[in-house]
Image: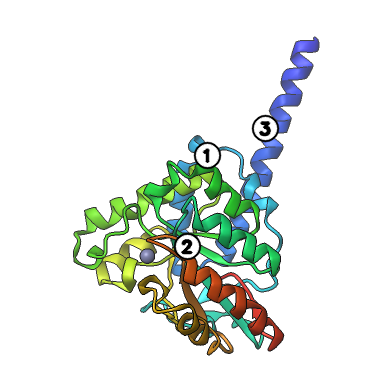
Amino acid sequence: MDDETTGTSRRRALWLFGVVAGLALAADEVRTPNGYRTAEAEIVPASPAVNPAPTPRARLRPPSWTPGRLVAAEEPVRELTQLSPPPPAKTIALTIDDGPHPVWTPKMLDLLAEHDVRATFFIIGEQVREQRELTRRIADAGHQICNHTMHHPLSLAGMSTKEVREEVVEAHDRIADATGVLPGFFRAPGGNWSDRVMDVIAEYGMLPIDWSIDPRDWARPGTGRVRSRLLEAGDGDILLCHDGGGDRAQTIKALRKAVPELKKRGLTFATL
Ligand SMILES: [Zn+2]
């Protein structure tokens, strides 16, 4: 009797979990454009086996602005105004690529926390294996987790559909497994896009993201130059910085000055 009651309760609990999970997925589908909705639904069933609890997503603070769908689906998004609905005036997005990195990502997270800024991290899948806890820390801090391929091939645009798919899907699975987050946005390494890349990421329900402000921090041009380029940001700009791929001391120093300055001008940092 007791066992049966317990069993019924457990089944009911599982059913309720299913309903809640279903609602969460339905909410995701609403946020994706029509053309991507089916693909998103297809990729989702594979994830519960890897990570059955979607709770990490629930830990994120609610964003002040959430784009509903892409207007210009034919090409990568370079400014927030290409998203729909467009963001409120004076909104910018800080995107951070090529991590997680054991030295620079924690410094970046501390800096962002200090200034209460939510950023968008384009993660390299193969680095998640060794930086699993750090990857989770990024998500738990309320930042957005996105897909930046498995191995960061700068030749992605020249790869076959099969090779592109492997780069995209392996990174997706690695990120989803570590964080419970299903990335909805993708950035090609070096911004090297091709029709094949666009087709594959559409197939998996992701939107292509580029940038409008590039301080070329990866080339270490000097803290002052990185900072002054970042300070050119205005309405709708997508800023590109890095927390991986080399010594990012200049990036951190430049952001330490630029972020409070941009906030002082009334600009609000948002995720995508
Ligand atoms: Zn990159």
Question: Tag 2, which secondary structure?
Answer: loop
CA gap, disc 3 and disc 2:
40 Å
Q: Is residue 232 visible?
A: yes
Which numbered disc, 1 or 3, marks the residue that appears first in the sequence?
3
Ligand 1 closer than 8 Å to the CB at disc 1? no
Which numbered disc, 2 or 1, marks the residue that appears first in the sequence?
1
Name the side, left or right, on which 178 lies relative to 190. Answer: right
Q: Which residue corresponds to mark 3?
A: 14
CA gap, disc 1 and disc 3:
13 Å
Seen at 48% across and 53% down, the residue is 41
Viewer-proximal residue, 52 or 99? 99
Question: Tag 1, which secondary structure?
Answer: helix
Seen at 63% across and 67% down, the residue is 118
Residue 180 in the image: x percent, y percent?
Answer: 56, 46
Q: Residues within 10 Å of mark 2 (few under 14, many from 20)?
A: many
Which numbered disc, 3 or 2, marks the residue that appears first in the sequence?
3
Residue 157 in the image: x percent, y percent?
Answer: 24, 68
Q: Which residue corresponds to mark 2?
A: 243
The picture quadrant where one finds residue 261 is bottom right
Amino acid tagged 2: Asp
Nearer mark to the viewer, of 2 and 1:
2
Image quadrant where one finds the C terminus: bottom right
Amino acid tagged 1: Pro
Name the side, left or right, on which 271 lies relative to 37. Answer: right
Is 268 located above or below residue 180 in the figure? below
Badges 2 and 1: C-beta atoms under 8 Å apart?
no
Q: Which residue corresponds to mark 1?
A: 48
Badges 1 and 3: C-beta atoms under 8 Å apart?
no
CA gap, disc 2 and disc 1:
30 Å
Seen at 48% across and 66% down, the residue is 249
